Image (cartoon, grey):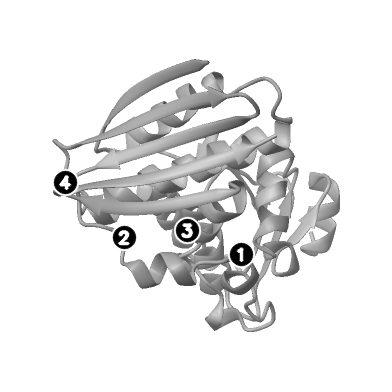
Amino acid sequence: MQEAELRVPSTLEAVAQATQQLRALLPDWLSGSEADAIELAIAEALTNVVQHGYAGQPGHEIRLRVRERDAAVEIDLWDQGRPIPRERLRNADANTTFQFDPTDLAGLPEGGMGLALIKSAFHEVRYGSRDGTNRLHLVRRL
Amino acid sequence: MDLIDIDRGASVPVVVPRVKRLDASVAPAFKQQVVQLVQAGEKRLVLDLGSVEFLDSSGLGALVSILKALGAQGTLAVCNARGPVLSLFHLTRMDKVFAIDADRATALARAGA
């Protein structure tokens, strides 16, 4: 079993760097497009924590762990910021978030797409908070 | 920092991002620099994404903002989106919103250059 851990400072520059580091840690059995989707999802998750969880404040940290099991890659993120509202996570879904009217220019979404992208990249998405620490648990199977 | 190059070789300006990753760390400044062009009077733009390797939802949101700034009378023709950048347009159904051409010449023609 392979396991690696990154500690990501709460800045968007650090998020970009960590996302690329994570890409190199992903197992070879993922296809290029699966790895792309995971890289994107982790960028979205880390960005969410920096912008919303830590309200854009530097000086905090996100712990990121990647583990490869038999036929799955598990990624965990831990942070001590404001948790993702339960409703927002539950309602985020690629089948609803991206069902906007493409002809309604003013109504096109400029944000709020991150959680749906996270959900669409993984088979399993679990989220919880305990003693001030939030944990996002993501699993992609073969 | 200049995040874009502007190629004025044709009658419609071609905006070329100078970053390989159009993500949350640069999206607001990128948006601002392109919207400035629109505010300066440009109604038609080509956006060449050939050098962009990574686009996240913030970068995509910036493109939507640019589209809104151009308004219904304006034109934004995107070209050279590839790999994960093109995949994000499909996944989010934004390929139904943006005109995406395979190359710059086609995008310029679409924009009426």
Of all chains, the one bearing label 1 is A
Distance between the Cα atoms at labels 1 and 3? 9 Å
**Residue type for callout 4:** Gln
Examine the rendered structure and indicate whether residue A48 appears above or below residue A24: below
Residue A124, image x and y in percent?
A: 54, 49
- Secondary structure at numbered mark 2: loop
**Residue type for callout 3:** Leu
Of all chains, the one bearing label 3 is A
Please name which of the two marks, 4 or 2, marks the residue nearer to the observer. 2
Proximity of marks 3 and 2: CB atoms separated by less than 8 Å:
yes
Of all chains, the one bearing label 2 is A
Same subunit, labels 4 and 3: the answer reads yes
Mark with earlier residue (4, 3) = 4
Give the residue number, with chain letter if any, for mark 4: A57
**Residue type for callout 1:** Ala
Q: Is B65 placed left or right of A105 in the picture?
A: left
Residue A115's label in the rendered image is 3
Q: Quick one: quadrant of the C terminus of chain B? A: bottom right
Residue A94's label in the rendered image is 1
